[in-house]
Structure formats: C-alpha cells, structure tokens
Image (cartoon, rainbow, N blue to C red):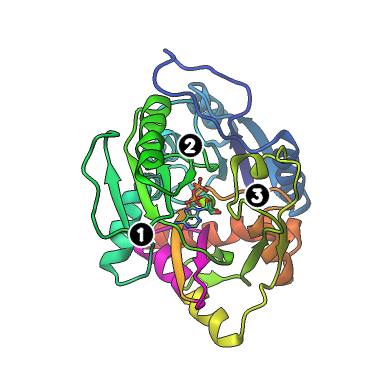
C-alpha cells in the first residue's frame, strides 16, 4: 500500500506565523526509523512535511480511489507548526480530503490536549485522577480542600513544560503567574501523587489492547519526569522497566484504567496513558497522550517489544489496525 509519512521538522510553510510555535517534534532519526520499517513491511513510502503544501503532494502521491477502495494511508507524525489546535491541523485536513490516516481524529486530539477536559471526562466516568482545580490568574480563588504539595501545569501543554511542584500558597501563585506569562493559558492545579509512575501503552480498536505497563524509575529527586529528562539534557537517566513490578491483579486493574481512559476520549489506533500510584498502590490518571513518543526508548515502543512486537513489527501493526478500521468504514459507506 502507499503510505505517506507526514511530519513537522523544519518547514514553517504557512500563510502567516500566528499563535504559539509548536515546541514538539518527532526526531529525524525516528522519522527515518518509521519510514524504513514501513518499507520493510512492503509499503511504498513517501515522506514530507505537514505544512500548507500537503494537499497537492498527497493528491499527486495517492491518485483518488475507485469507489469502495483505499488509495493509500497517511502515517501521521504531525504535532503541528503553530497554534493551540496544532495536533488537529493535519488530521483535520486529511479528514476533509478523505484520506485515511494512522492515529486519533481531530476531535480526540482536542480533548486529549486539554488536560482539564480530559480529567472532567474521566472523572464523570468514575475513573480516578488527582484532585484538581483550575486557576486563571495568580490572584484567582483556590479550592479550599486541596493538600500541599501540589503540581501546577499549563492546562494544554506537553513535555512537562511549565510544570512545577509547589509546597505553599506563595509558590502556587508564582507558578500560576509564570504559566500565564509564558503560555497565556490557565493553570491546572493538582494534588501531587507521591509514589510510583507507570505508563500504559494502548494498541488497536474494538477491542483496544493494553500493553504491559512500563515503570519510570527515579533514583533521585525530583521524582517528576521533567522536560530535561524527556529531552535527555537533565544529566540523569530515568530508567524504564517493563513489565513494571506489579502483581497480576494490579497490572490488570491499571491496564483496565488505561483502556477506559482511551475509550472515554475516543482514541484511535494507539495512545499512552500516564499514571501515578500513591503509597497504597491506588492508581490515578495524569493524562492521555494522543500523539505518544515513538522513538526506540519511548515507553510505548518498549512495551510493544515486551509483547513480542519489535519496532518494525509495531509500526506496521499500527498501519494494519488503522487499515482495518477504515475497511470497516468503507464497507459501511458503500452499503448505504
Ligand atoms: N499530580 C501529579 N502528581 C505527581 N507527579 C505528577 C503529577 N502531575 C504531573 N506529574 C509529573 O509530571 C510529569 C508530566 O506531567 P503530565 O501530566 O504527564 O504532563 P505532560 O507529560 O503532558 O507534560 C509526569 O510524568 C509526572 O512525573
Ligand atoms: Mg505525560
């Protein structure tokens, strides 16, 4: 099949630069790894930047399908170029053009990017997440029943940007101000869950499968997965253990929590749920990542490997699960 890998690396080709530039990207190495894996899987691969030129490039690469067939797929690695809706831009254009793609749809990216909305949805489903409030400004009222230490984070950022642990009201208000100044956004204030950190990778649709949990091992303070850790500039190594040392019952419970979270926000094909366990072992969902890391030392890839899917097999499996999903849709549509 024709598979177009679309990513954001260097191109800034938009009509105007407007809104906050995107801070995230999949590395060139990961993009090459994915391209090579897809080629090994027998696909005809074409790769290009997700900018304003994608429509003409896709039209050229994927000639329109005969009714009821798929002319090709996109492997979407676009975090976007700019703006608050950046994860949604490429899936939105693909949806409009009728091009199948691997990964979640724009509506889900919108929900998952907003940690407050995610927490409201999962709380409504009865799933555990740290107690929280939202502060618009540093002088906003504070929910009275929250216990320090607290975590402050921008409600719609990623990579631990702007996140800090605070132990008193002065630090809290300073953190809220810093977040507003840097990101012009509201602050999610959460109780700090003092305990282990677990990532659960998810793969597939109806039913989605939870991969073996991965534990992040912090050997020293801060016991927080920081921006610097994520980009390997912290000077420390946070080891990832898979499967996490959990009992069978704990594993099943945490995997079910991850599955319920995935379904609650309507993810497709793959995602990763970040969870903390308190000292008694009770799990709390921190967030769901609708565009999880796919480099070789990311939790999702480690978990897939533990399940018997090496990198090449995992990447090709993602295309398969997305393809199966579209085949179902095409059959439904042509039956109408
Ligand atoms: N409520 C919390 N309690 C304990 N640690 C937290 C909490 N919220 C975030 N963290 C730490 O900060 C990291 C990043 O937070 P997260 O909510 O996953 O946002 P993102 O990864 O999108 O920046 C987590 O991996 C965890 O180490
Ligand atoms: Mg996270």
Q: Is residue 225 magenta?
A: no
Residue in front for this viewpoint, 140 or 162 = 140
Quadrant of res 12 = top right
Residue 316 in view: no
For label 1, the SS is loop
Badge 3 is on which residue?
294
Residue 252 in the image: above or below residue 203 = below
* Marks 3,1: beta carbons within 8 A: no
**Among the two numbered marks 3 and 1 on one chain, the one whose residue lies closer to the N terminus:** 1
Crowding at mark 2 (Cα within 10 Å: few <14, some 14-19, many 20+): many
Residue lying farthest to the top in this orientation: 16
Q: Quadrant of the C terminus?
A: bottom left
Residue ID at (76%, 41%): 235
Does residue 36 appear in this view?
Answer: yes
**In the image, which residues are magenta?**
257-281
Residue mark closest to the camera, 2 vs 1: 1
Q: Going 54% across and 72% down the picture, which residue do you hit?
A: 209
Q: Secondary structure at mark 3?
A: loop
Q: Residue at x 63, y 72 (%)?
A: 212
For label 2, the residue is 162
Q: Residue furthest left?
A: 141
Residue at 75% over, 50% down: 237
- The circle drawn on residue 147 is 1
State the image quarter where residue 2 is shown: top right
């Amino acid at each position: 099949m024709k598979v177009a890998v679309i990513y954001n690396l260097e191109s800034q080709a938009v009509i105007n630069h407007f809104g906050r530039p995107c801070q995230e990207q999949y590395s060139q190495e990961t993009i090459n790894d994915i391209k090579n894996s897809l080629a090994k899987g027998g696909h005809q691969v074409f790769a290009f930047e997700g900018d304003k030129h994608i429509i003409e490039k896709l039209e050229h690469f994927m000639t329109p399908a005969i009714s009821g067939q798929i002319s090709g797929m996109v492997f979407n690695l676009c975090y976007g170029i700019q703006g608050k809706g950046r994860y949604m831009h490429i899936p939105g254009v693909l949806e409009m053009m009728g091009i199948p793609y691997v990964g979640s749809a724009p509506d889900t990216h919108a929900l998952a990017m907003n940690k407050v909305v995610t927490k409201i949805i999962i709380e409504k489903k009865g799933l555990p997440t740290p107690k929280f409030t939202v502060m618009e400004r540093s002088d906003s009222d504070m929910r009275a029943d929250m216990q320090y230490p607290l975590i402050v984070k921008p409600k719609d950022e990623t990579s631990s940007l702007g996140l800090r642990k605070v132990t008193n009201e002065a630090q809290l208000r300073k953190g809220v101000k810093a977040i507003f100044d840097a990101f012009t956004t509201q602050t999610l204030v959460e109780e700090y869950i003092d305990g282990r950190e677990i990532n659960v990778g998810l793969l597939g649709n109806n039913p989605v499968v939870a991969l073996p949990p991965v534990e992040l091992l912090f050997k020293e303070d801060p016991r927080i997965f920081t921006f610097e850790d994520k980009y390997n500039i912290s000077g420390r190594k946070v080891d990832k253990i898979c499967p996490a040392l959990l009992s069978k019952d704990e594993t099943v419970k945490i995997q079910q929590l991850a599955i319920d979270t995935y379904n609650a926000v309507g993810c497709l094909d793959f995602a990763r749920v970040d969870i903390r366990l308190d000292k008694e072992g009770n799990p709390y969902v921190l967030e769901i990542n609708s565009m999880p890391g796919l480099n070789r030392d990311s939790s999702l890839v480690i978990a897939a490997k533990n399940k018997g899917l090496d990198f090449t097999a995992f990447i090709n499996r993602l295309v398969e699960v997305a393809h199966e999903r579209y085949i179902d849709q095409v059959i439904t549509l042509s039956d109408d």
